[in-house]
């Protein structure tokens, strides 16, 4: 079981593309954001090619594949279109996520337990291209155990409920849910990542949970970058999570 205090920062650049798509311009370019993020200490770059293409486009993923110095974490729904695209680009990491066309953002985790055969087939197929496959799931023992059974080497725990919690009691309850999920995942021999809705004001408690491999953070970084620049936004976040993990 890993209990080191090393923690990685995966920078999600989806919402740089959201701003570009709002006007159909060529700017701001998520590829430039990715390169700036790497210079500022990002350990990896996350992109979610949504079925509706509301932010990241194929062009972004193809360019990133050529220029990234770190590694790509490619988030995708479990569809034939995405499986074929992933086979073409062979990202270092693939995270399978649930997708609902009308949702504002990824509202919950993938129901692995409810569709084990389908997810197992996807994990097997994507593992053949050399990608490390992770499943974006709620911090729920049933889903974590199912993730282990379908052969995924990694999971990413959805921290959205923690991020959205309002009262101190709710925050504590959701944080405990994430911490328990991390411990259970590690005990199953899984690599445990976490992300969604993490911000400068709520990230430290999650980064302090021992054994988390990587935090994936996007929306808050892009929002903060409007005021301080992308490199500063990333380096501030990186410093916060490293300090919290060491504490
Ligand atoms: C799966 C996940 O958490 C990220 O891809 C995040 O969802 C990106 O932002 P949107 O959900 O707003 O597309
Ligand atoms: N998988 C979570 C992610 O990549 C970033 O989510 P958010 O910080 O944009 O909410």
Image (cartoon, rainbow, N blue to C red):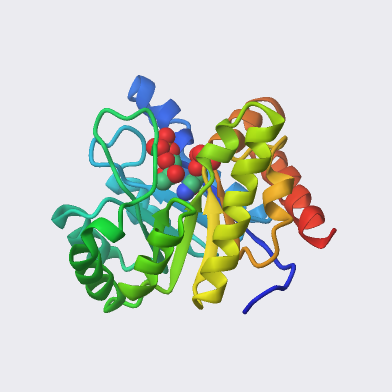
Q: Is residue 78 left or right of residue 245?
A: left
Residue 235, image x, y percentages: 73, 47
Q: Residue at x 45, y 68 (%)?
A: 154
Residue 79, image x, y percentages: 18, 53
Which residue ends up furthest to the top in the rendered image? 23
Residue 184 sits above or below residue 201 on the image? below
Q: Which one is nearer the viewer's eye here, 90 or 126?
A: 126
Q: Which one is nearer the viewer's eye here, 90 or 23?
A: 90
Residue 85 sits above or below residue 26 on the image? below
Which residue ends up furthest to the left in the rendered image? 80
Looking at the rendered image, the quarter that the C terminus falls into is bottom right
Q: Is residue 129 left or right of residue 44?
A: left
Residue 161, image x, y percentages: 52, 38
Q: Residue at x 61, y 47 (%)?
A: 36
Looking at the rendered image, the quarter that the N terminus falls into is bottom right
Q: Residue at x 37, y 72 (%)?
A: 152
Q: Is residue 216 left or right of residue 93?
A: right
Residue 68, image x, y percentages: 49, 60
Q: Quadrant of residue 3?
A: bottom right
- The reply to whether residue 198 is in sight is yes
């Amino acid at each position: 079981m890993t209990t080191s205090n090393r923690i990685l920062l995966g920078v999600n650049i989806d919402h740089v593309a959201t701003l570009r798509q709002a006007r159909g311009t060529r700017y701001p370019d998520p590829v430039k954001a990715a390169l700036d993020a790497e210079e500022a200490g990002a350990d990896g770059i996350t992109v979610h090619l949504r079925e509706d293409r509301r932010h990241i486009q194929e062009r972004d993923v193809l360019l990133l594949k050529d220029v990234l110095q770190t590694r790509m974490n490619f988030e995708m729904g479990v569809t034939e279109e995405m499986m074929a695209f992933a086979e073409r680009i062979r990202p270092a990491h693939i995270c399978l996520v649930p997708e609902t066309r009308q949702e504002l953002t990824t509202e919950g985790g993938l129901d692995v337990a409810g569709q084990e055969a389908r997810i197992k087939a996807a994990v097997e197929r994507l593992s053949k291209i050399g990608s490390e496959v992770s499943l974006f799931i709620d911090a729920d023992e049933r889903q974590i155990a199912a993730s282990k059974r379908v052969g995924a080497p990694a999971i990413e725990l959805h921290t959205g409920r923690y991020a959205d919690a309002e009262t101190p009691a709710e925050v504590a309850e959701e944080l405990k849910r994430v911490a328990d999920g991390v411990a259970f995942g590690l005990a199953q021999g899984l690599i445990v990542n976490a992300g969604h809705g993490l911000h400068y004001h709520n990230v430290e408690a999650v980064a302090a949970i021992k054994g988390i491999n990587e935090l994936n953070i996007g929306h808050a970084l892009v929002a903060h970058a409007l005021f301080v620049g992308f490199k500063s936004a990333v380096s501030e976040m990186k410093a916060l999570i490293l300090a919290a993990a060491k504490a």
